[in-house]
């Protein structure tokens, strides 16, 4: 089984209006997430619902990837707040 993860992928950066990163989403396979984070090698933060890792897309775009911990995950509102 391959898990799919949704992540925001910025198309261009702007200084006004909503972030394009929030408007466009792309689903990555778990294998792609493992590759972009180099097997979850660099922890950049921790939250109540999981650990956040540094990653880099093939196009060089830097990303933060949150790996949810089902034991501590309490819903979408908590996830969004972090």
Image: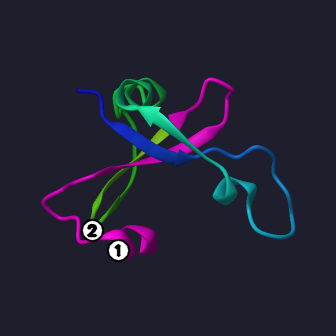
What secondary structure is marked by label 1? helix
Q: Where residue 50 appears, x then y in whole percent? A: 28, 57
Query: Does the segment drawn in magenta span residue 80?
Result: yes
Horizontally, is 53 left or right of 60 in the view? left
What secondary structure is marked by label 2? loop
Horizontally, is 37 left or right of 50 in the view? right
Which residues fall within the magenta stretch?
A: 55-82
Return the residue nearer the eye: 26 or 70. Answer: 26
| CA separation in Å, label 2 and label 1 | 8 Å
Q: Answer above or below: position of 77 versus 73.
A: below
Q: Answer above or below: position of 1 versus 17.
A: above
Q: Residue at x 29, y 71 (%)?
A: 75
Q: Which residue is mark 2?
A: 48
Quarter holding the C terminus is bottom left
Q: Which residue is mark 1?
A: 78
> Badges 2 and 1: C-beta atoms under 8 Å apart?
yes
Quarter holding the N terminus is top left
Q: Where residue 78 appears, x then y in whole percent? A: 35, 74
Query: Does the segment drawn in magenta span residue 62?
Result: yes
């Amino acid at each position: 089984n391959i898990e799919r993860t949704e992540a925001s992928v910025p198309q261009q950066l702007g200084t006004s209006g909503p972030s394009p990163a929030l408007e466009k989403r792309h689903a990555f396979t778990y294998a792609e997430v493992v590759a972009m984070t180099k097997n979850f090698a660099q922890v950049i933060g921790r939250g109540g619902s999981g650990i956040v890792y540094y990653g880099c897309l093939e196009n060089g775009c830097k990303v933060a990837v949150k790996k949810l911990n089902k034991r501590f995950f309490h819903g979408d509102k908590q996830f969004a707040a972090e």
